[in-house]
Image (tube, grey):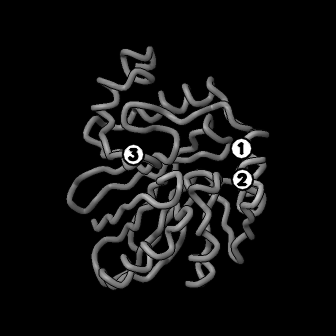
Amino acid sequence: MLVVGFAAGAFQANCYVLATGAGGDCVIVDPGEGAREHVDEALREHGLTPAAVLATHGHFDHVHSAAEIADAHGVAVWIRPEDRVLLSDPLKGLGPELAAAFASVSLTEPRLVRELGTDPLELAGMRVELVHTPGHTPGSVVFRLDTDEGGRIALTGDTLFAGSIGRTDLPGGDSREIASSLRTLLACSDDTVVLPGHGPTTTIGRERATNPFVGDGGGMS
Protein backbone atom coordinates (compact mmCIF):
# COMPACT_ATOMS: atom_id res chain seq x y z
CA MET A 1 0.00 0.00 0.00
CA LEU A 2 1.13 3.51 -0.80
CA VAL A 3 0.74 5.95 2.09
CA VAL A 4 1.77 9.58 1.78
CA GLY A 5 1.37 11.64 4.94
CA PHE A 6 2.16 15.23 5.83
CA ALA A 7 1.23 17.87 8.39
CA ALA A 8 -0.36 21.08 7.16
CA GLY A 9 -1.65 24.38 8.47
CA ALA A 10 -1.23 26.29 11.70
CA PHE A 11 -2.43 23.28 13.70
CA GLN A 12 -0.14 20.85 11.82
CA ALA A 13 -3.01 18.45 11.19
CA ASN A 14 -1.97 15.26 9.43
CA CYS A 15 -3.38 14.57 5.97
CA TYR A 16 -2.94 11.21 4.28
CA VAL A 17 -3.13 10.02 0.68
CA LEU A 18 -3.74 6.25 0.42
CA ALA A 19 -3.62 3.99 -2.64
CA THR A 20 -2.89 0.37 -3.49
CA GLY A 21 0.06 1.65 -5.49
CA ALA A 22 1.24 4.30 -7.91
CA GLY A 23 -0.68 5.06 -11.08
CA GLY A 24 -4.20 4.40 -9.82
CA ASP A 25 -7.01 5.76 -7.71
CA CYS A 26 -6.54 7.04 -4.18
CA VAL A 27 -8.40 8.37 -1.16
CA ILE A 28 -7.47 11.54 0.68
CA VAL A 29 -8.03 11.62 4.44
CA ASP A 30 -8.37 14.87 6.42
CA PRO A 31 -7.16 17.58 4.03
CA GLY A 32 -6.92 20.54 6.39
CA GLU A 33 -5.68 24.08 6.04
CA GLY A 34 -2.94 24.37 3.43
CA ALA A 35 -3.22 20.73 2.35
CA ARG A 36 -4.08 21.36 -1.33
CA GLU A 37 -0.51 22.03 -2.47
CA HIS A 38 0.85 18.93 -0.75
CA VAL A 39 -1.99 16.75 -2.06
CA ASP A 40 -1.46 17.97 -5.62
CA GLU A 41 2.25 17.22 -5.32
CA ALA A 42 1.54 13.68 -4.14
CA LEU A 43 -0.95 13.11 -6.95
CA ARG A 44 1.58 14.25 -9.57
CA GLU A 45 4.50 12.34 -8.09
CA HIS A 46 2.67 9.03 -7.88
CA GLY A 47 0.26 9.41 -10.81
CA LEU A 48 -2.83 9.18 -8.60
CA THR A 49 -6.47 10.10 -9.21
CA PRO A 50 -8.69 10.91 -6.20
CA ALA A 51 -11.71 8.68 -5.71
CA ALA A 52 -12.93 10.24 -2.47
CA VAL A 53 -12.11 12.53 0.41
CA LEU A 54 -12.63 11.04 3.89
CA ALA A 55 -13.01 13.01 7.11
CA THR A 56 -12.24 11.49 10.50
CA HIS A 57 -14.26 14.36 11.99
CA GLY A 58 -15.47 17.83 11.11
CA HIS A 59 -13.08 20.24 12.85
CA PHE A 60 -11.82 22.78 10.34
CA ASP A 61 -8.15 21.97 10.83
CA HIS A 62 -8.99 18.59 9.25
CA VAL A 63 -11.50 19.59 6.57
CA HIS A 64 -10.45 23.13 5.60
CA SER A 65 -9.39 22.02 2.09
CA ALA A 66 -11.93 19.21 1.70
CA ALA A 67 -14.39 21.10 -0.51
CA GLU A 68 -11.64 22.65 -2.63
CA ILE A 69 -10.00 19.30 -3.36
CA ALA A 70 -13.19 17.25 -3.72
CA ASP A 71 -14.87 19.79 -6.01
CA ALA A 72 -11.75 20.09 -8.18
CA HIS A 73 -11.80 16.34 -8.83
CA GLY A 74 -15.57 15.80 -8.86
CA VAL A 75 -15.57 13.40 -5.90
CA ALA A 76 -17.50 13.26 -2.64
CA VAL A 77 -16.47 14.12 0.88
CA TRP A 78 -17.46 11.34 3.26
CA ILE A 79 -18.26 12.35 6.86
CA ARG A 80 -20.45 11.17 9.72
CA PRO A 81 -23.87 12.90 9.80
CA GLU A 82 -23.22 14.22 13.32
CA ASP A 83 -20.34 16.34 12.04
CA ARG A 84 -21.69 17.32 8.63
CA VAL A 85 -22.76 20.78 9.79
CA LEU A 86 -19.11 21.61 10.50
CA LEU A 87 -18.33 21.46 6.78
CA SER A 88 -20.21 24.73 6.32
CA ASP A 89 -20.28 26.16 9.86
CA PRO A 90 -16.88 25.42 11.42
CA LEU A 91 -17.41 27.74 14.39
CA LYS A 92 -20.05 25.34 15.77
CA GLY A 93 -17.22 22.98 16.64
CA LEU A 94 -15.34 25.56 18.72
CA GLY A 95 -15.85 27.03 22.16
CA PRO A 96 -16.56 30.76 22.57
CA GLU A 97 -12.91 31.80 22.89
CA LEU A 98 -11.72 29.77 19.90
CA ALA A 99 -14.75 30.84 17.86
CA ALA A 100 -13.83 34.47 18.49
CA ALA A 101 -10.21 33.83 17.55
CA PHE A 102 -11.17 32.09 14.30
CA ALA A 103 -14.23 34.15 13.41
CA SER A 104 -12.77 34.80 9.96
CA VAL A 105 -12.73 31.11 9.04
CA SER A 106 -15.41 30.44 6.42
CA LEU A 107 -16.19 27.15 4.70
CA THR A 108 -18.63 26.08 2.01
CA GLU A 109 -20.05 22.57 1.98
CA PRO A 110 -18.62 20.46 -0.86
CA ARG A 111 -20.86 19.90 -3.87
CA LEU A 112 -20.94 16.16 -3.15
CA VAL A 113 -21.27 14.92 0.43
CA ARG A 114 -21.85 11.33 1.47
CA GLU A 115 -22.66 10.40 5.04
CA LEU A 116 -20.70 7.61 6.68
CA GLY A 117 -22.60 4.84 8.41
CA THR A 118 -21.29 1.53 9.69
CA ASP A 119 -20.84 -0.41 6.46
CA PRO A 120 -17.32 -0.62 5.01
CA LEU A 121 -16.48 1.46 1.95
CA GLU A 122 -14.96 0.03 -1.22
CA LEU A 123 -12.86 2.86 -2.63
CA ALA A 124 -9.82 2.99 -4.91
CA GLY A 125 -9.47 -0.78 -4.76
CA MET A 126 -9.36 -0.73 -0.96
CA ARG A 127 -11.79 -1.89 1.71
CA VAL A 128 -12.12 0.82 4.33
CA GLU A 129 -13.72 -0.30 7.60
CA LEU A 130 -15.44 2.31 9.75
CA VAL A 131 -15.43 2.55 13.53
CA HIS A 132 -17.59 5.28 15.04
CA THR A 133 -15.53 6.76 17.89
CA PRO A 134 -17.45 9.67 19.46
CA GLY A 135 -15.88 11.67 22.24
CA HIS A 136 -13.69 14.25 20.54
CA THR A 137 -16.67 15.14 18.36
CA PRO A 138 -20.00 13.32 18.04
CA GLY A 139 -19.10 12.26 14.50
CA SER A 140 -15.52 11.14 15.02
CA VAL A 141 -14.63 7.97 13.15
CA VAL A 142 -11.58 5.74 12.72
CA PHE A 143 -10.78 4.26 9.31
CA ARG A 144 -9.21 0.78 9.35
CA LEU A 145 -7.54 -0.94 6.40
CA ASP A 146 -5.66 -4.17 5.80
CA THR A 147 -2.73 -3.79 3.42
CA ASP A 148 -1.83 -6.19 0.64
CA GLU A 149 1.46 -6.73 2.45
CA GLY A 150 -0.37 -8.13 5.47
CA GLY A 151 -0.21 -5.06 7.69
CA ARG A 152 -3.00 -3.18 9.40
CA ILE A 153 -3.60 0.57 9.49
CA ALA A 154 -5.91 2.70 11.64
CA LEU A 155 -6.41 6.37 10.81
CA THR A 156 -7.53 7.66 14.17
CA GLY A 157 -8.03 11.39 13.59
CA ASP A 158 -8.15 13.17 16.94
CA THR A 159 -9.37 10.16 18.90
CA LEU A 160 -5.96 8.64 19.60
CA PHE A 161 -2.45 10.11 19.34
CA ALA A 162 0.99 8.83 20.23
CA GLY A 163 1.01 9.22 24.01
CA SER A 164 -2.25 11.14 24.23
CA ILE A 165 -5.89 11.39 23.14
CA GLY A 166 -8.16 14.05 21.70
CA ARG A 167 -9.56 16.85 23.83
CA THR A 168 -13.15 16.58 24.99
CA ASP A 169 -13.80 20.16 26.15
CA LEU A 170 -15.05 21.52 22.82
CA PRO A 171 -18.75 21.48 21.79
CA GLY A 172 -19.90 17.90 21.36
CA GLY A 173 -16.94 16.47 23.25
CA ASP A 174 -17.57 13.82 25.89
CA SER A 175 -14.96 12.21 28.14
CA ARG A 176 -17.06 9.12 28.84
CA GLU A 177 -17.70 8.55 25.15
CA ILE A 178 -14.04 8.86 24.22
CA ALA A 179 -13.16 6.37 26.97
CA SER A 180 -15.60 3.90 25.42
CA SER A 181 -14.22 4.63 21.95
CA LEU A 182 -10.69 3.97 23.15
CA ARG A 183 -11.73 0.61 24.57
CA THR A 184 -13.12 -0.26 21.13
CA LEU A 185 -9.83 0.71 19.46
CA LEU A 186 -7.87 -1.48 21.87
CA ALA A 187 -9.59 -4.46 20.29
CA CYS A 188 -7.30 -3.90 17.30
CA SER A 189 -4.19 -6.06 17.18
CA ASP A 190 -0.99 -4.70 18.73
CA ASP A 191 0.75 -4.49 15.35
CA THR A 192 -1.89 -2.12 13.94
CA VAL A 193 -0.12 1.03 12.76
CA VAL A 194 -1.84 4.16 14.05
CA LEU A 195 -1.86 7.15 11.69
CA PRO A 196 -3.15 9.94 13.96
CA GLY A 197 -4.56 13.35 13.20
CA HIS A 198 -1.59 15.10 14.80
CA GLY A 199 1.92 14.03 15.68
CA PRO A 200 3.94 10.92 14.83
CA THR A 201 2.75 7.46 13.92
CA THR A 202 2.56 4.77 16.56
CA THR A 203 1.02 1.33 17.09
CA ILE A 204 -1.88 0.02 19.12
CA GLY A 205 0.54 -2.13 21.10
CA ARG A 206 2.76 0.83 21.97
CA GLU A 207 -0.21 2.90 23.08
CA ARG A 208 -1.63 0.02 25.09
CA ALA A 209 1.67 -0.24 26.94
CA THR A 210 2.69 3.40 27.35
CA ASN A 211 -0.20 5.81 26.75
CA PRO A 212 -1.40 7.08 30.16
CA PHE A 213 -4.95 7.47 28.80
CA VAL A 214 -5.38 3.91 27.51
CA GLY A 215 -4.29 0.36 28.21
CA ASP A 216 -3.49 -1.02 31.62
CA GLY A 217 -2.16 2.30 32.88
CA GLY A 218 -5.35 4.11 31.96
CA GLY A 219 -7.69 1.48 33.31
CA MET A 220 -9.14 0.80 29.87
CA SER A 221 -7.79 -2.66 29.18
- Direction front: furthest residue: 101
User: Residue at 65% across / 53% down in the picture?
Assistant: 58
All told, the count of numbered labels is 3
Name the one closer to the observer, 62 or 47: 62
Residue 57 image offset from top left, x and y in percent: 60, 51
**Crowd around label 1: few <14 · some 14–19 · many ≥20 (10 Å):** few
Q: Tell me the residue at 38%/67% (across/down).
A: 18
Compared with 178, 60 (above or below) is below
Which corner quadrant holds the C terminus? top left
Mark 3 vs mark 1, CA separation in Å: 21 Å
Q: Is mark 1 on a helix, strand or loop?
A: helix
Q: Which of marks 3 and 1 is in front?
A: 1
- List the residue tagged with mark 1: 98
Question: Is label 3 in contact with label 1 (beta carbons under 8 Å)?
Answer: no
Percent position of residue 45, x then y: 30, 82
At numbered mark 3, what does the secondary structure look like: helix, strand or loop? loop
Amino acid type, mark 3: Gly
Residue picked out by circle 2: 102
Question: Where is mark 3, residue-wise?
Answer: 199
Residue type marked 2: Phe
Q: Are marks 2 and 1 in contact (CB under 8 Å)?
A: yes
Name the one closer to the observer, 93 or 81: 93
